[in-house]
Image (spheres, coloured by chain):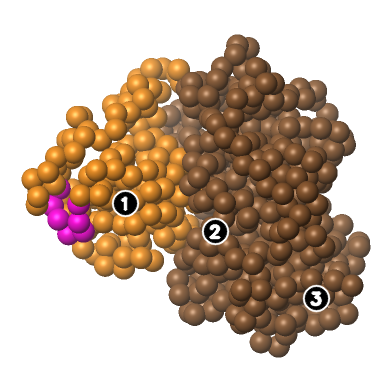
Chain colours: A brown, B orange
């Protein structure tokens, strides 16, 4: 009897647990990436001794290179060399084919009812498939690599009920920004967000990833969607093991947030906090130096499709540059096949290797002093994309594509036929 | 005892240690850029024993453990906030950086004042005003990790994670 989070922990432990309890559980998968692995390896060594320590299960320990790939500096290359050494020693496969939060589900390392911990705050994305997945620091992940276990405080749950129909030009990214505006940047701190309602049921897995990805932007431990036929269809061919289709059972929610999305318009989160959300028309005059389409929030095939449909036959404004980075190799190849990549290149965009790109300000499109970017990212924090005086605005792939054409923040609805 | 560095709400891990400076495991290197986006003078002026006081949701954003590590390496004795973001709070406890939740201490202290913390008792003293404040007690399991000096030390002591 409980929320989806309580059901997952109860299933794992074989006894009913409820919010507030501190539990220690065996985790199903553990992940770290090129930036967080070095400290995780340090913690692992400290715990297991300099030599001879083994990870709990090399098939369920995953290292993804995505933050700076290919390595942009000697410092990054050195850390990556050391991580490769650790991976070889432990028999861990390093995945270098896109953003960890895209690659983990694509590769079948996420299934409903599983518990996954990752050394990256956006690990909460996997909740879209009905798994309990949460971001932790490197030391926690080093401990999980060594022991296969982690401790959790079973979280209270806020139920987010989404109903109504999205207007043309309005997307799940806009809904997500509206939720951050309403709930606030710490309104869900320590809690799980469980998304339900007729809109959520109608969403694709990609759209559910967008929704759950930004749960952390409200402080949440994770975002969750109960698995359904859409989930099963997406997992077919990716996950061969059996998994439980756990559902909330007479849940007691801490509170319920109801949003009818029918009246929403395209939204923009203004710097420097994600809850500074305004309708696009309020900021349409703002000149943009660079747009960026990609990331674990909006770098998937449907995101590229929306942007390509707006950019087809058009070119980017001469005062603006555009960076496009598919979230994974799988997405990239499919986008190539469907002609989206050609559309972007012909429009004047730079297309990058799957990975995080400029989202964390290290390479492939960092910003100079005073520059402004509109991106499909999840964070608009000071200095995140480069110089601390640069400004980051967040919006949907459609808004980003429309803005690329005009050079200033633009309502995408004027480009929809 | 040390100087109070007073910060506002929602101090995120990108401003505690920017992504462009955290491609390292060298803690002294991290300390050099600690809080550089909002307090460029911090790294130069911070002294052993200083205390950070902050508003709500301190440490929100990225899971980078480089953030509490940078603060710890800069010599800060404790971070006292009205509330912490979850991953930062956990990371700080795991690596042995003292983090205390105390609304009253933050509301009644100013930047540049002197303070000290009795970590065992959770007792915060503003030495400039003479006021004393009691931080929120920790849940027993977390208190045991803090007492051990971090999660690694805790597991070594217990023999396993339990």
Q: Quadrant for residue A314, please give it.
A: bottom right
In the image, which residues are magenta? B109-115
- Work out which quarter of the rendered image holds the N terminus of chain A and state it: top right
- Say whether residue B114 is magenta: yes
Q: Find numbered disc 3 in the image and state the secondary structure of the residue it sits on.
A: helix
Relative image position of residue A43 (x, y in whole percent): 44, 36
Query: Dot 3: within a 10 Å radius of its alpha carbon, few (fewer than 14), some, or many (20 or more) residues?
Result: few
Q: Give the CA distance from mark 1 to mark 3.
A: 44 Å
On the image, numbered disc 2 is attached to which residue?
A274
- Say whether residue B151 is magenta: no
Q: Quadrant for residue A111, please give it.
A: top right
In this rendering, does residue A340 appear at all?
yes
Against B24, is A247 above or below? Answer: above
Against B157, is B138 above or below? Answer: below
On the image, numbered disc 1 is attached to which residue?
B54
On the image, numbered disc 3 is attached to which residue?
A414
Q: Give the CA distance from mark 3 to mark 2.
A: 25 Å
- Residue at 89% x, 72% y is A417
Q: Nearer the viewer, residue A231 or A294?
A: A231
**Secondary structure character of the magenta stretch overall:** loop
Q: Nearer the viewer, residue A388 or A118?
A: A388
Chain that bears disc 3: A
């Amino acid at each position: 009897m409980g929320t989806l989070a309580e059901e997952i922990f109860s299933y794992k432990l074989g006894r009913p647990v409820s919010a507030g309890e501190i539990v220690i559980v065996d985790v199903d998968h553990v992940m770290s990436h090129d930036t967080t692995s070095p400290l995780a390896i340090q913690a692992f060594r400290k715990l297991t001794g300099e030599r001879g320590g083994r990870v709990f299960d090399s098939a369920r320990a995953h290292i993804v290179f995505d933050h700076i790939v290919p390595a942009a500096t000697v410092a990054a290359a050195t850390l990556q060399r050391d991580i490769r050494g650790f991976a070889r020693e432990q028999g861990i496969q390093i995945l270098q084919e896109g953003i960890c939060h895209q690659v983990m589900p694509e590769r079948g390392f996420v299934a409903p009812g599983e518990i996954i911990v990752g050394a990256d705050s956006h690990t909460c994305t996997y909740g879209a498939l009905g798994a309990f997945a949460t971001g932790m620091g490197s030391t926690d992940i080093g401990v999980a690599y060594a022991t296969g276990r982690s401790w959790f405080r079973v979280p209270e749950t806020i139920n987010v009920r989404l109903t109504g129909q999205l207007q043309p030009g309005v997307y799940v990214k806009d809904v997500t920004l509206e939720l951050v505006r309403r709930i606030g940047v710490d309104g869900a701190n320590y809690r799980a967000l469980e998304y339900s309602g007729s809109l959520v049921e109608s969403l694709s897995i990609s759209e559910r990833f967008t929704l759950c990805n930004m749960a952390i932007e409200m402080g949440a431990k994770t975002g969750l969607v109960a698995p359904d036929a859409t989930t099963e269809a997406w997992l077919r061919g990716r996950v061969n093991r059996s998994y439980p289709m756990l559902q909330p059972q007479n849940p007691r929610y801490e509170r319920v947030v109801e949003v009818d999305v029918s009246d929403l318009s395209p939204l923009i989160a203004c710097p420097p906090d994600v809850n500074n959300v305004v309708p696009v028309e309020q900021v349409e005059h703002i000149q943009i130096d660079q747009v960026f389409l990609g990331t674990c929030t909006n770098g998937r095939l449907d995101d590229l499709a929306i942007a390509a449909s707006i950019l087809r036959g058009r070119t980017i404004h001469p005062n603006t540059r555009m960076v496009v980075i598919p979230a994974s190799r799988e997405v990239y190849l499919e986008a190539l096949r469907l002609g989206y990549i050609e559309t972007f290149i012909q429009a004047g965009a730079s297309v990058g290797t799957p990975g995080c790109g400029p989202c964390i300000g290290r390479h492939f499109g960092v910003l100079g002093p005073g520059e402004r970017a509109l991106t499909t990212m999840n964070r608009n924090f000071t200095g995140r994309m480069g110089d601390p005086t640069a400004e980051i605005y967040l919006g949907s792939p459609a808004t980003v594509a429309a803005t690329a054409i005009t050079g200033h923040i633009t309502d995408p609805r004027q480009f929809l036929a | 005892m040390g100087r109070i560095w007073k910060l506002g709400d929602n101090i995120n891990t990108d401003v505690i240690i920017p992504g462009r400076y955290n491609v390292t495991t060298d803690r002294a290197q991290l300390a050099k850029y600690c809080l550089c986006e909002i307090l460029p003078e911090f790294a130069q002026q911070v002294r052993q024993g200083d205390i950070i006081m902050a508003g709500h949701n301190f440490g929100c954003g990225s899971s980078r453990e480089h953030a509490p590590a940078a603060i710890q390496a800069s010599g800060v004795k404790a971070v006292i906030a009205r509330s912490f973001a979850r991953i930062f709070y956990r990371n700080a406890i795991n690596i042995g950086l003292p983090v205390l939740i105390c609304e009253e201490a933050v509301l009644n202290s100013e930047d540049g004042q002197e303070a000290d913390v009795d970590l065992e008792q959770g007792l915060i003293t503003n030495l400039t005003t003479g006021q004393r404040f009691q931080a929120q007690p920790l849940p027993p399991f977390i208190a045991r990790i803090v007492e051990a000096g971090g999660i690694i030390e805790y597991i070594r002591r217990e023999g396993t994670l339990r």
